[in-house]
Amino acid sequence: MKKYTLGIDVGGTNIKLGLVSSVGKVVSRTCLDTSSFKSNKNKFIQGIALAADELMEETKINRKDILGVGVGLPGLVDPVKGVVNFLPNISGWKNIPFKKLLQDELKIPTVIDNDVNLVTLGEWQFGAGKGYKNFVCITLGTGVGSGLVLNNDLYRGEGNVAGELGHIPINEKGPKCSCGGWGCFESYVGNQYLIEKGSKIFKNKNIQLEDVFNLANHDNVRAVQFWDEVATHTGNVLVGIINLLNPRLIIIGGGVSNSYKYLGATINKIVKQRAMKIPASMVKIVKAKLGDDAGLIGAHVLVKERSR
Ligand SMILES: [Zn+2]
């Protein structure tokens, strides 16, 4: 029996690869820097294939032990055709037959999907969403996205591109966004924006979000306010989700969710103040459980589903 799946989680900053066991545990992993490939698609595919080979060699897991490869990509992906339509945070990626290219290189059956859909599948089967029929999983990171589980099924939309929560406009004017629109939620809480904002406030060009967590941990008033503003934008968007979809659960994941400690109280306060009473009384807001592995574990869930 084929015991493992190979999960690949492509992010705006790095590409994670992991061999996942049949019980959804990442048994071995490696990581590549996205910026070293993004301008050259062939190099990108070959880089992933090489890293996958090294990972298998290291762990003495052969191709014949691998059921399939699941890849999460940050943007609009057609999982049926296996085509990457558009990645807002990785320029130059338009209408690429990614599934075929990678499958030809790896010689293992491959499936692709939107990265947040995979995080959602992972959290649904093995994490915070276990047992829920109606929930929304949002990720706050370089990109901001969501996966929607409605009536016990992953909702994909008519063209398989539903869930682009980061590109809900929250301001009629607002800054121009990488998606082509303006005033998008992601332009207010995406990592890039937050780092720029943090470097201005704290007058430090090299500031990282972790530094702003640490400052808030030491009760720095401006750092606490910084996270409160992130929570306020997020809370307002969640009010919209709650009123629109009446979910039982909202899971918050992605890198920024590490600061959930500073976000949770404000988000819940806004939901209580602004959302309609009935849907607000039914919803629970929690932090994601699978952390950085969610995408890899979700890739495993997708491969299993497709190979049934
Ligand atoms: Zn946008």
Image (tube, rainbow, N blue to C red):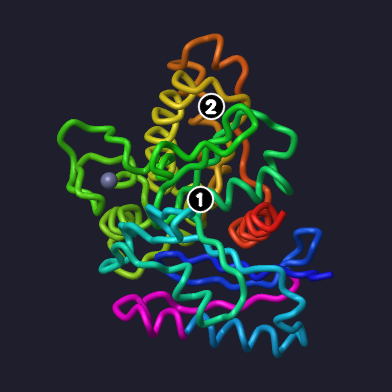
Q: Closer to the camera, 291 or 153?
A: 153
**Disc 1: which residue:** 116
Residue at image position (51%, 42%) is: 147
The amino acid beneath tag 2 is Asn
Quarter occupied by the C terminus:
bottom right
Q: Quadrant of the N terminus?
A: bottom right
Q: Which residue is mark 2?
A: 268
Q: In the visual, does 202 lie left or right of 293?
A: left
Q: Nearer the viewer, mark 1 or mark 2?
A: 1
Above or below residue 197? Residue 21 is below
Residue extending farthest left: 173
Residue depicted at x 52% and y 36%: 155
Q: Residues within 10 Å of mark 1 (few under 14, many from 20)?
A: many
Residue 199 % position (x, y): 30, 60
Residue 201 drawn in magenta = no
The boundaries of the magenta stretch are 27-46
* Residue ID at (41%, 24%): 240
In the picture provided, is 250 more to the left or to the right than 47?
A: right
The residue closer to the viewer here, 249 or 6, is: 6
Specify which label sits upstream in the sequence, 1 or 2: 1
Above or below for 247 versus 263? above
Q: Secondary structure at mark 1?
A: helix
